[in-house]
């Protein structure tokens, strides 16, 4: 037995020695181009894509490159052909696994994003958590600027999207969210809209509301207030601020938590949507309210906050009805409430949705006033 065991050990050792080390599909880092962001613009011809790839430069940490990224672009009739052309001119494999964001320009989104996203969904290196945004300017313009704090534009924009998602999951979308929305024909897709600003010679990227897509085509935009109303009405919100103005003063309120629920029913020949919102608030800044007590100010601010929340949600619904875009998922809710009825009205949903009877109720609880209990002009508590 000892001889047999020794022979087996020798055989196993020889087998491992003959197996080559490393992974069969591994690549050396110096043969790869690490893609940080991809921008897609509409080509001059109807079915063309202008694709721009931002590639992060890999250098010695002690030596910061003057430009930390490289931009390469190509024009083709499909995404895969454009990326292959970029690979050939760069003489390196494009490594998309580290891609952080996909930027789609306004004009291309108006044509439809489904064919564009099809390649990304099929490509084995694409991650489903890659952020997606719509740019009001050419996507290439966003990728080519160098910001002050984070020189790699794609990384800066991806961090902005992550921050937005922490405020509310409705304020940022990734490939998974986009795919789910495209599979749900009744619910419109809301994607963050970004653009560039130039103040005092410094170019910055900022989020300018949201783009609204029906099926896969851009139909319009929500401004900042409408976007906040959408997030409040669709919920939840984990952090944010609302500005309140009353006859006696104004305040900035911090939203620590807000949840929303939607119930739908068929009344007569229309859908009725009941939206209920509950928010926990605290005072971040307060001005005015001369001579008023803290209890009285709390009551006034709670009332004003509820009215403001209802107003913001109403504006978002009004814009959605004007665009014939069911951003709140009313049709989806009807499908869960009454599947048979939904199958009957589904073909006519674009015409039925704008006629929805809307009821919004909100409840706001002001929890605290911050480190101080009153403003400098309010009445002190005895």
Image: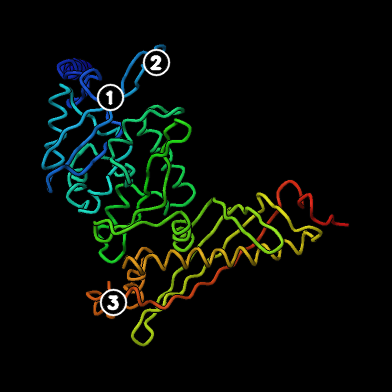
Which numbered circle lies on residue 70? Answer: 1
- Gap between marks 3 and 1, in whole Å? 51 Å
Residue ranking furthest to the bottom: 268
Q: Which residue is mark 2?
A: 64
Q: Nearer the viewer, residue 177 or 5?
A: 177
Q: Secondary structure at mark 3?
A: helix
Q: Secondary structure at mark 2?
A: loop
Q: Which residue is mark 3?
A: 342
> In which image quadrant can residue 301 be found?
bottom right
Going 33% across and 36% down the picture, which residue do you hit?
142
Residue ranking furthest to the right: 382
Left or right of 125 on screen, residue 314: right
Going 18% across and 15% down the picture, which residue do you hit?
17
Left or right of 288 on screen, residue 50: left
Q: Position of residue 368 (x, y in %)?
A: 70, 54
Q: Earlier in the sequence, mark 3 or mark 2?
A: 2
Q: Earlier in the sequence, mark 3 or mark 1?
A: 1
- Gap between marks 3 and 2, in whole Å? 59 Å
């Amino acid at each position: 037995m000892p001889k047999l065991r020794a022979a087996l050990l020798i055989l196993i050792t020889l087998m491992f020695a003959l197996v080559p080390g490393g992974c069969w599909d591994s690549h050396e880092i110096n043969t790869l181009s690490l893609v940080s962001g991809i921008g897609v613009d509409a080509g001059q011809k109807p079915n063309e894509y202008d694709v721009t790839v931002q590639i992060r430069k890999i250098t010695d940490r002690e030596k910061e490159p003057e430009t930390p990224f490289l931009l390469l672009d190509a024009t083709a009739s499909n995404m895969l052909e454009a990326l292959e052309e970029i690979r050939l001119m760069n003489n390196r494999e494009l490594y998309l696994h580290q891609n952080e964001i996909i930027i789609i320009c306004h004009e291309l989104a108006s044509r439809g994003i489904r064919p564009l996203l099809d390649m990304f969904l099929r490509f084995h290196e694409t991650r489903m958590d890659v952020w997606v945004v719509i740019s009001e300017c050419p996507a290439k313009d966003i990728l080519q600027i160098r910001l002050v704090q984070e020189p790699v534009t794609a990384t800066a924009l991806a961090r902005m999207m992550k921050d937005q998602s922490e405020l509310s999951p409705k304020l940022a979308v990734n490939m998974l969210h986009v795919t789910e929305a495209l599979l749900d024909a009744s619910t419109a897709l809301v994607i963050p809209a970004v653009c560039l600003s130039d103040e005092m010679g410094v170019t910055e990227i900022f989020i300018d509301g949201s783009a609204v897509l029906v099926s896969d085509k851009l139909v319009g935009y929500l401004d900042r207030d409408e976007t906040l109303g959408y997030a409040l009405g669709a919920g939840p919100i984990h952090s944010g601020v609302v500005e309140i103005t009353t006859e006696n003063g104004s305040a900035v309120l911090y939203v620590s938590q807000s949840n929303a629920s939607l119930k739908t029913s068929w009344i007569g020949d229309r859908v009725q949507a009941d939206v209920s919102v509950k928010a926990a608030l605290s005072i971040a800044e307060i001005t005015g309210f001369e001579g008023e007590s803290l209890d009285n100010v709390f009551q006034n601010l709670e009332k004003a906050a509820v009215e403001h929340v209802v107003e913001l949600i109403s504006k978002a619904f009004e814009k959605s009805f004007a665009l014939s875009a069911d951003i709140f998922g009313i049709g989806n809710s009807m499908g869960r409430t009454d599947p048979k009825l939904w199958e009957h009205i589904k073909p006519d949903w674009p015409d039925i949705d704008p006629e929805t009877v809307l009821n919004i109720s909100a409840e706001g609880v002001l929890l605290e006033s911050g480190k101080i209990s009153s403003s400098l002009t309010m009445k002190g508590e005895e």
